[in-house]
Amino acid sequence: MLRSFDDFLLHNLLFLLATIALGCATTQYTGRPTTAAGPPSPAVIVENAQEQSDAINRPTSNPYTGDLSIFEDPKRDEKLQPNRIMDILGVKEGSSVADIGAGSGWFTVRAAWRVGNAGFVYSVDINRDYLDYIEKRAKRENLANIRTILGKEDDPLLPEKSVDAVLLLKTYHEIAQPIRLLKRTRVAMRAGALLGIIDRNGKGDDHGLNKEVVIKEAERAGFALVNQYDFVKPDNVDYFLVFRALP
């Protein structure tokens, strides 16, 4: 009888120990910290909301993808007057300039001649083939002061506080999200830098955009209009707008 009672106690003790051990193992496994993502931080929420408020929904033109020789018409210098454009934007020897939507590099090389070896020209485009063309052209013309950048549709990827002048030449009507692009361009501009936009009046999808629309969008991006000109192809269709970044 005593042996049976001792066996009974031993059996229950072993069962209790096994139950405790199993419970500890289960608790340890199921109690691991989870990696479930928590709610987004307030900063992320604000940033996302700002991105949405900057979004533009209007017609745009498809970027040109044809033969780049079309931009090298000798009459283009006479019509667009690049030296006068650079005078207005304050481009001089030693300046750092951004040509956004550079295409064939028509303005890029002219700016490179102006700024000299002490300056730089950032040639920005979203088309890698165009940048390859510009790099070959720069090498052929011994222009070591040109830096090509493969930008994004809403970001030119320019270094912060790197430029004294920016030009968007016949490019604005192709930009799907101009406010986002201009805001990021603004970050790259040094104090006192000017932004020039040359385009033609239009509806957006006809390779032009009315200047009133451009002015409003630039203002939303933090720029103030300081002057406007009509000497580029003076036909009341083309315009040249000059902006300064607001503090």
Image (cartoon, rainbow, N blue to C red):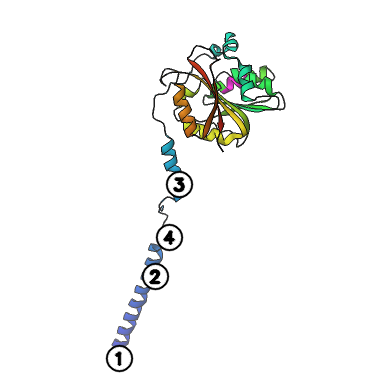
Q: Position of residue 202 (x, y in %)?
A: 43, 18
**Residue identifier under label 1:** 2
Which label sits in the foreground, 2 or 1?
2
Query: CA–CA distance between discs 1 and 4?
Result: 49 Å
Which label sits in the foreground, 2 or 3?
3
Q: Secondary structure at mark 1?
A: helix
The mark nearer the N terminus, 2 or 4, is: 2
- Which quarter of the image is occupied by the C terminus? top right
Q: Residues within 10 Å of mark 3 (few under 14, many from 20)?
A: few
The magenta stretch is: 131-136
Under mark 3, the amino acid is Val
Query: CA–CA distance between discs 2 and 3?
Result: 40 Å
Q: Position of residue 169 (x, y in %)?
A: 54, 21
Q: Secondary structure at mark 4?
A: loop
Residue 14's tag is none
The mark nearer the N terminus, 3 or 1, is: 1
Place residue 22 in its image quadrant: bottom left
- Most extreme residue toward the right is 117
- Which quarter of the image is occupied by the N terminus? bottom left
Q: Position of residue 155 (x, y in %)?
A: 51, 33
**Residue identifier under label 4:** 33
**Residue identifier under label 3:** 44
Q: Is residue 28 above or below residue 50?
A: below
> Front-most of 86 and 136?
86
Q: Is residue 246 above or below residue 83?
A: below
The mark nearer the N terminus, 2 or 3, is: 2
Disc 2 and disc 1 in contact, CB within 8 angstroms: no
Tell me, yes or no, whether the highlighted magenta stretch contains residue 56.
no
**Residue identifier under label 2:** 24
